[in-house]
Structure formats: structure tokens, C-alpha cells
Amino acid sequence: MPANTSPIFGLTPNLQTNGTTGMSQLVTLAANDYTGIGANNVLAFTAGSNGSFVQRLRFKPGGTNVASVARIFINNGSTVGTATNNTFIGEISLPATTAIATAATVDIDYPCNFALPAGFKIYWGLGTAVAAGWTCVAIGADY
């Protein structure tokens, strides 16, 4: 497929779940850091070979959880364990949730609306450990 010569529009949709396509991986352990190097931070998105546009991150609980926070980082594509390769871009509160058979659990959207250079990544981590876990779906497009 040829490269997109008008990168204001995405060429192909790109949905990623915790860094993979396919089934969600629930995150239960806390990273609780502001540097992006926490042991329990999880890859949410990797930009394509021509860069990508990320519209939003959607957080969804996997069941009953205590309240927590999702902290979100951009990584320059290099070693995530080096703090200078990561930028803390924001955080969003995740409420306590109760999974029941008669009501939906909450969807929490973190708006991004920015372009990422080729190979850059988005990581996220929880501030507090939870029981059932949360998953993150990155919604965007590759250029």
C-alpha cells in the first residue's frame, strides 16, 4: 500500500489493546509512578511505520474494582526503562466499579487527538492495585 501523502487523514484504522490486537489483557497491578518506568506499566499503542494519529484511549473495567487512576506516558520508541525516553502526558481517574448482571460497567475515555512519530509508543499504568483489572483500547489510525 502506498504511503499516505495527506497525513491529516489516517490511511488505515489502528486499534490496539494493551499493545496487541485481539483479546484484552486485564491489568491489576499498580505501577504508581510519574516517569513511565514502573514495573507494571503496560504498552497501549505503537505508531506505524509512517506515524499514527491517536484519537483516544478507552478504559474498561473487567469487573469489580476499587477506585484507581490511569497514568499515561509517551515513549520515544527506545528503552522504556530509561526515564528520559518517556513523557508523562496525563492521567484519568478510574472509579470504583461493581460488576452485576443487570447494568453495564462504565467506559472511561481519555481524549488524545495527537499524531505520534513512527515507532513512538503509549504506555499506561494504574496508581492503585485493583481486583478484577482494567483494560485499555487505543483508537487511532496509521498514516
Image (spheres, grey):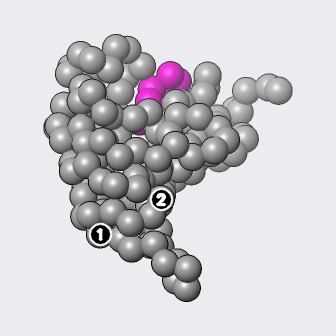
Q: Is residue 16 visible?
A: yes
Q: Say which mark, if any, is on residue 13.
A: none
Q: SS class of the residue under badge 2?
A: loop
Name the residue type under label 1: Ala
Residue 119 counted in the magenta span:
yes
Name the residue type under label 2: Gly
Q: Is residue 102 above or below residue 83?
A: below
Q: Say which mark, if any, is on residue 62.
A: 2
Q: Position of residue 72 (x, y in %)?
A: 31, 44
Q: SS class of the residue under badge 1?
A: loop
- Read off the residue under disc 1: 96
In the displayed structure image, the side of residue 14 where residue 120 appears, left or right: left
Q: Residue furthest bottom?
A: 102
* Residue bounds of the magenta highlight: 117-122
Q: Residue at left 25%, top 42%?
A: 30
Q: Residue at left 25%, top 49%?
A: 129
Q: Position of residue 74 (x, y in %)?
A: 35, 34
Q: Residue at left 40%, top 56%?
A: 132
Q: Residue at left 33%, top 63%?
A: 65
Q: Position of residue 138 (x, y in %)?
A: 52, 47
| Quarter of image, res 35 | top left
Quadrant that contains the N terminus: top right
Q: Residue furthest right?
A: 1
